[in-house]
Amino acid sequence: MEQTRTNQYQWTSNQLSFRFASLRNSIINYYIKTKKQNEREELYHYFKTHFEATTERTIHKNELEKIIQNEIDALPLKMKQIYLLSRNQELSHKEIADLMAISELTVKKQVANALKILKKKVNYVLFTFF
């Protein structure tokens, strides 16, 4: 009988050790899972806020660029040519005047008028749509 009790005691001890180890591992796995889930949620919120905003900004920027380009295309031909030479090719008023055989004052006025027209139309679009 003593032998049976000893075996029974050892079995209970082994069983307790096994259950303790199993419980410990379950708790560790739960914390790891929770931590990973929290990290995933944090990453999701980070990317959602940063990249949605970036995507939205990119879309607005592209729309605004299209609007500006359409307005530049709508300028009178000479004004458009002078404006593009001034802004895109970064030529000075004197260089544009020499290239187009017109006075510097005309170039200066044409650039100023183009900017005034573009500012009015772009401001209207910005306040209306954005």
Image: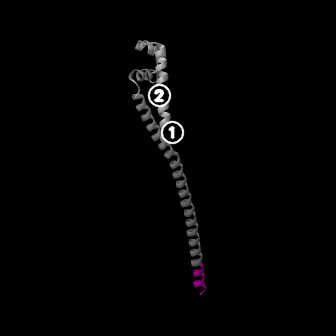
Residue 101 within the segment the image draws in magenta: no
| Residue sitting at x 46%, y 16% | 106
Q: Position of residue 14 (x, y in %)?
A: 57, 74
Name the secondary structure under disc 1: helix
- Tell me the crowding category of disc 2: few under 14, some 14 to 19, or many 20 or more residues within 10 angstroms, Cα based: some
Side of 81 where 47 appears, left or right: right
Q: Is residue 53 above or below residue 31?
A: above
**Of the pair 70 and 42, the residue shown nearer to us:** 70
Name the secondary structure under disc 2: helix
Q: Amino acid at mark 2?
A: Ile
**Of the pair 17 and 83, the residue shown nearer to us:** 83
Side of 97 where 35 appears, left or right: right
Disc sitting over residue 117 in the figure: 2
- Between discs 1 and 2, the one toward the N terminus: 2
Magenta: predominant secondary structure element? Answer: helix
Disc sitting over residue 127 in the figure: 1
| Residue sitting at x 47%, y 21% | 111
Quarter of the image with the N terminus in it: bottom right
Side of 130 where 10 appears, left or right: right
